[in-house]
Image (cartoon, helix red, strand yellow):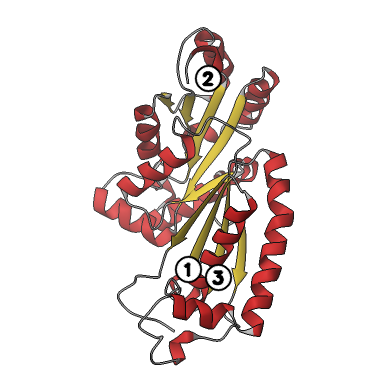
Amino acid sequence: MSGAAGRDRWLVVTGISGSGRTTALHALEDLGWYCIDNLPPSLLPHLHDTLRASPYHGVAIGLDVRTADTHGSFEQAFDDLRARGVDLTLLYLDCSDEVLVRRFGETRRRHPLLAAGSIPAAIAAERRQMMTMRERTTLVVDTSALNIHQLKAHIADLFGTAQTDRTQLRVNLVSFGFKHGSPRDADWMFDVRGLLNPHFVPELRPRSGSDADVASYVLESDDGAALLSQLLATLRLVLPLHRREGRVLVTVAIGCTGGRHRSVAIAEALAAALSADGEDLVSVQHRDRDRLRVSV
């Protein structure tokens, strides 16, 4: 997309330092977006005036805690852009504290709020300062389990050239194990630990919920069939509401204890049913299914 068709499509990329903002901007640049990092929010309307007649796929602006937390100026700038008819999306990248501490240790980069003391203290201070921005955001991506290449691929899925119809809604179903931590970017989270556990069936234990026998064991029980029906009814109710809200991504997390059997089977069954319903874009991620250690 370029010229008049694309010049009012803007994306603000922000979030917690170390969560991948720079990587996301590089991915967007590769996709044909005009990218600027850490432009003061008060200058965004002026940038819109400058780029009004320029051809591009879209405009992506990176904001970190130093530029995003400027006494509410970003809210005024965003409202100004929307009043001009700009299609503005806020992408907030998040990550677990544990992974952030490790990333800063590996890269030896300085956290922008390191004056707060230690890296954990700086992260905590940043989360407090970014809360207003976080509350304004309807698109959150958790990068805790993503490497650079996976994050770039995810950005391409969300904002690539084929993703031009803003009426489309991507539904991302994520299976996970509670013992490994809950996903930070889930809009909806369902606990399926009450279902019969294939882990306790010797012939099913080494398999996963992607296996037909394991899926049958989970889904064909009375509780499994009833729960699947209720979850599907809930999603059929709320997804049109999210689409009407203008969301481009809804993440639905399905959790069991280890993330290998029950959550996988339920997530895949939901994905199949939603695709059959005609949902625009449905994807499934099994965060913990293939961990080397098989967990209950």
Say which residue appears at 36% left-offset and 57% top-offset: 101
**Total of numbered circles in the picture?**
3
Residue 141: image location, x then y, percent: 49, 48
Measured in 3D between alpha carbons, the distance from the residue under mark 3 to the one under mark 1, in whole angstroms, is 11 Å
When the figure is inspected, residue 93 is found, relative to residue 32, above or below; the finding is below
Question: Neighbour class for label 2 at 10 Å: few (<14), some, many (≥20)?
Answer: some
Question: Looking at the picture, how far across and down is residue 266, in whole percent?
Answer: 55, 70
Q: Residue under circle 1?
A: 176
Residue at point 56%, 86% (across, down)? 196
Task: Determine which residue is flagged by label 3.
Answer: 266
Per the image, label 1 sits on a secondary structure element best described as strand
Give the distance between the C-alpha atoms of the residues marked 2 and 1, in whole angstroms: 37 Å
Image x and y of residue 283, in percent: 49, 53
* Dot 2 or dot 1, earlier in sequence: 2
Q: Camera-side residue: 25 or 166?
A: 166
Q: Is residue 286 visible?
A: yes
Compared with residue 176, is residue 205 higher up or lower down, i.e. above or below? Answer: below
Q: How many residues crowd around disc 1 within 10 Å: few (fewer than 14), some, or many (20 or more)?
A: many
According to the picture, the residue beneath numbered tag 2 turns out to be 6
Q: Which of 41/287 is in front? A: 287
Q: Is residue 138 left or right of residue 60?
A: right
Q: Secondary structure at mark 3?
A: helix
> Which circle's residue, 2 or 3, is located before the other in the chain?
2
**Res 31 → quadrant:** top left
Choose top left, top right, bottom left or bottom right for residue 118.
bottom left
Q: In the rendering, at what x and y percent does residue 79 appear?
A: 68, 26
- Between circles 2 and 3, the one closer to the viewer is 3
Instruction: Identify which amino acid the numbered label 2 is placed on.
Output: Gly
Q: Name the residue: 40% across, 70% down.
A: 289
